[in-house]
Image: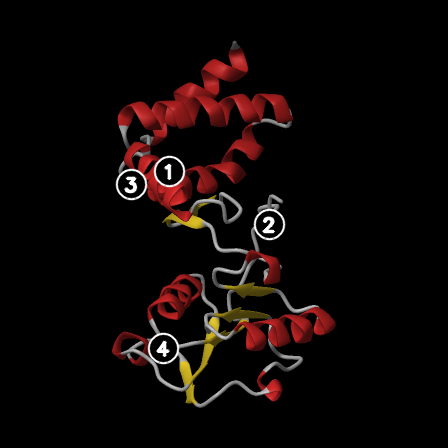
Amino acid sequence: MAFFPFYSDIDNKNALIIGGQSVALAKAKKVLEFGARVKVISLTVCDEMSALPVEISLREFRDTDITDETDFVISACTDTAVNEHIFEMCKAKRIPLNVVDDKRLCTFIFPAIVKEDDLVVGISTSGSSPIAARWLKHEIQSVIPEDFGDLLEYMSELRSYVKSVSGDEKVRGQILKCIFEKCLLKEGRLADNERDEIVSEVING
């Protein structure tokens, strides 16, 4: 079964991670990068986890750890019975759950992520081959132009300007397409006169 790739805003969302070693650490780092607030429950945690800006409770998981304030749960513990119990709790509360290396207990999975500022590419094999997903991640990273994040910021800034010069959606789309292609060739932002020249060419044919 393939997983549909929803993109979700997790900024300031409450993440509960059960487990404190390398796998849990990797998950914590990923969600922290997107602004989540992370609570970790584990009898032990690795040194690197201790250095992260997360709340840590050094103990076993309790049912009361999953509350109405919990937005999503990641279980990186190795006890199948515990994972199955957590799955039933999250299912009842309709809380998204990722159980590491057990697809049948997941309601969401972690893709291999390529991120540069606003650019986010998620790559998933639906659990079939994480190695293949990581390989494809590196391939995608190798073809992304340098400073692509800055180009996306520039294109975002242009949207209001382009709306002001044309009320025709098709024309606006063509203007943005031409500017984007020019930026790729130039490998950077356009000067205002270059931008205006493209606008004039598109509008006037």
Q: Amino acid at mark 3?
A: Asp
| Amino acid at the residue labelled 2 | Phe
Residue in view at x 57 percent, y 34 percent: 163
Residue assigned mark 2: 6
Which residue in the protein does label 1 denote?
136
Q: Which residue is mark 4?
A: 53
- Disc 1 or disc 4, which is closer to the eye? 1
Query: Between disc 1 and disc 4, whose residue precedes?
Result: 4
Picture disc at residue 174: none
Look at the numbered discs 3 and 1 and tell me whether their residues touch, using CB distance below 8 Å.
Answer: no
Amino acid type, callout 1? Leu
How many residues crowd mark 1 within 10 Å: few (<14), some (14–19), many (20+)? some
Give coordinates of residue 10: x percent, y percent.
Answer: 53, 63
Residue 154 higher or lower than 183, as above or below: below
Q: How is the image coloured?
A: secondary structure
Name which of mark 2 and mark 3 comes first in the sequence: 2
For marks 2 and 1 on the same chain, the one whose residue lies earlier in the sequence: 2
The amino acid at mark 4 is: Pro
Q: Is residue 109 left or right of residue 90?
A: left
Reading the image, the residue beneath label 3 is 147
Mark 4 or 3, which is nearer the eye?
4
Above or below, 132 against 51 in this view is above
